[in-house]
Image (cartoon, helix red, strand yellow):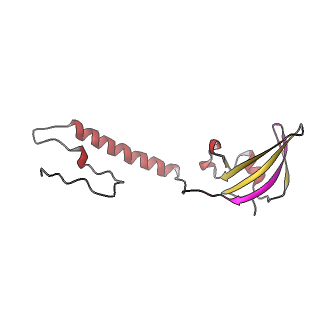
Amino acid sequence: MLVALNTTVTLILFTANGGSEQMTVHLVSDSRADYARGLFGANTPLGRALLGHAEDETLPYPEGDVVRLYIVSVQPLQTDAPEKSAEDVIKQAVTDINHTNAVLFASSYSSKWGDYDPDGIDHPDDDHPAKDNPES
């Protein structure tokens, strides 16, 4: 299997002083990169060096004290759930903010015609409608 987007690559980094270190990286699109979780963007120096190569290849990699890479294995990326795009995350945040604003307004508003009931406000993600108000 060749290294491509959405693959997990186990490799060995060889240093100029003769040392080596094994690491596993998950190669993803740049928008999903998260180094803390081991998700490396395809346009990083390491991503560009690995793309298109296969298991059991040794590649030159003159970055810092690393001089070459050895690709131990290449596997499809295993994910528990599909990652949300940044646009989806922003849309969800706006929906949640709008709902919170409606609840805050309802809990702080009273008038001569009656109070709003914050429990009666449906959240767009709820699977069930707001509770029926026994007083209506």
Q: Where in the figure is residue 9, as x and y percent of width and height?
A: 73, 54
Q: Where in the figure is residue 124, as x and y percent of width and height?
A: 34, 53
Name the one closer to the observer, 104 or 11.
11
Q: In which quarter of the image is the N terminus?
A: bottom right
Residue in view at x 81 percent, y 48 percent: 12
Q: Where in the figure is residue 22, as x and y percent of width and height?
A: 78, 46
Residue farthest along the bottom direction in this orientation: 1
Name the one closer to the observer, 113 or 37.
37
Magenta-highlighted residues:
62-82
User: Quick check: is 126 in the magenta stretch?
Assistant: no
Residue in view at x 32 percent, y 50 percent: 123
Q: How many marks?
A: 0
Please, what is the dominant secondary structure of the magenta stretch?
A: strand
Answer above or below: position of 112 versus 88: above
Residue farthest along the left direction in this orientation: 112
Residue in view at x 65 percent, y 43 percent: 35
Residue in view at x 71 percent, y 60 percent: 75
User: Quick check: is 65 in the magenta stretch?
Assistant: yes
Name the one closer to the observer, 66 or 29.
66
Q: Is residue 87 left or right of residue 134?
A: right
Q: Where in the figure is residue 121, as x and y percent of width and height?
A: 26, 49
